[in-house]
Amino acid sequence: MKKIIASPLTLPLVWIFFFVLTHWPSEKLPDAPFIPHVDKVIHFSLYAVLGYLLSERLSKNGSAKKHAWIVFVVLAAYGIFDELTQPYVGRTAETLDWLSDICGVLAGITFQRDRQKKRAGNEPAR
């Protein structure tokens, strides 16, 4: 699993796959009326993964605070782009989707920073 996450191809491939998912025409998507606001959960989850992967990639260089801000700004801006381009494929742009994206990004960043601290604590002293 570590090798997959560490691969330089993982982030761009996942990002492209998520772009396709969020731009799939709505009439071709399965309906899930039994799960209220399932689209918000999906947005949160997708952006949490992107937040984690981008944080992991950038954590190799620079300070944790600096890269966390970069990840947040880049993915928040991408979330706006994502929402504004969805109407071109028959989907709707929703502010709540974007807020779900942002919450997911924050969760992904937090999870990555927590794992990084745990990894640093488990390294043997040199």
Image: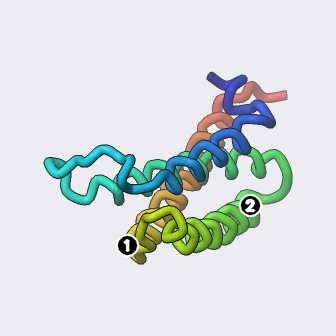
x, y percent for residue 116: 65, 42
Please report contact status of discs 1 and 2: CB closer than 8 Å, yes or no: no
For this rendering, which residue is in front, 67 or 53?
53
| Residue at 45%, 73% in the rendered image | 93
Q: Where does residue 82 sit, x and y in percent of width and height?
A: 57, 66
Occupied quadrant, residue 91 = bottom left
Determine whether 126 is above or below 34 in the image. Answer: above
Indicate which disc residue 115 carries: none
Other-residue count near label 1 (Cα within 10 Å), few / some / many at <14 / 14–19 / ≥20:
few
- Under circle 2, the secondary element is helix
Left or right: 36 in relation to 57: left
| Mark positioned earlier in the residue sequence (1 or 2) | 2
| Residue drawn at the location 67% of the way across and 25% of the way down | 2
Q: Secondary structure under badge 1?
A: helix
Residue plotted at (74% across, 25% down): 124
Establish if 80 lies above or below 51. Answer: below
Residue at the spot of label 2: 67
How far apart are the alpha carbons under marks 1 and 2? 25 Å
Q: Amino acid at mark 2?
A: His
Residue shown at 52%/56% (left/top)?
23
- Residue picked out by circle 1: 96
Foreground: 96 or 51? 96
